[in-house]
Amino acid sequence: RDIKPENLLLDANYDIKVTDFGLSAIVKPGQLLRVACGTPSYSAPEVISRKEYDGTLTDVWSLGVLLYHLTHGCLPFNDIAHIRAGDYRVNSELIPPAALDLLRTMLVVRPEQRATLPTVAAHP
């Protein structure tokens, strides 16, 4: 629930390693979380709005923010209002079409319409 650049490392083979599990949670399938935590710039709208949420779908959102940050060199949202609205701009000159397609499935405000982790992993 706190995916951001500071919590990711690369090993010698350029494999990504996630660190800092201080905000992690073990959940059962279908279980929703209630505690709003994480870094606001990377938090999904439902977390910021203090609604119950599916932790894996909020991770997809955070990974989308990370993808945007990596391709654009800045964060996609200026403030919480923009996060809640899913209001961001892309520069299609900075991001390959396949990455843009993936990004648009990840930064979806309604979690039930957002890509799932298996969908993200299978994306070309």
Image (spheres, rainbow, N blue to C red):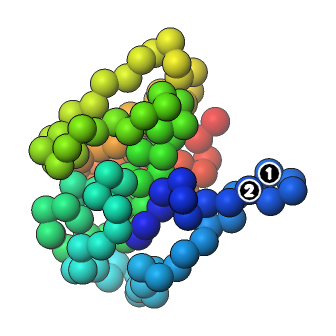
**Residue drawn at point x = 55 percent, y = 64 percent:** 7
Callout 2 amino acid: Leu
Number of marks in the rendered image: 2
The dot on residue 10 is 2
In the rendered image, which quarter is residue 53 located in? bottom left
Would residue 122 appear left or right of 33 to someone viewing this image?
Answer: right
The dot on residue 99 is none
Image position of 124 with respect to 32: above or below? above
In the rendered image, which quarter is residue 40 located in? bottom left
**Residue drawn at point x = 54 percent, y = 59 percent:** 6
Would residue 20 appear left or right of 74 to someone viewing this image?
Answer: right
Q: Which residue is the site of mark 1?
A: 14
Q: Position of residue 84 (x, y in %)?
A: 16, 48
Image position of 42 with respect to 78: above or below? below
- Labels 2 & 1 near each other (Cβ < 8 A): yes
Disc 2 crowd rating (10 Å Cα; few below 14, some 14-19, many 20+) is: few
Q: Quadrant of the N terminus?
A: bottom left
Callout 1 amino acid: Tyr
Which residue is more in the foreground, 64 or 28?
Answer: 64
In terms of secondary structure, where does tag 1 sit?
loop
Would residue 44 appear left or right of 97 to someone viewing this image?
Answer: left
Q: Does residue 107 show up?
A: yes
Q: Position of residue 72 (x, y in %)?
A: 48, 28
**Residue drawn at point x = 87 percent, y = 56 percent:** 12
Q: Position of residue 24 (x, y in %)?
A: 45, 80
Q: Position of residue 89 (x, y in %)?
A: 31, 24
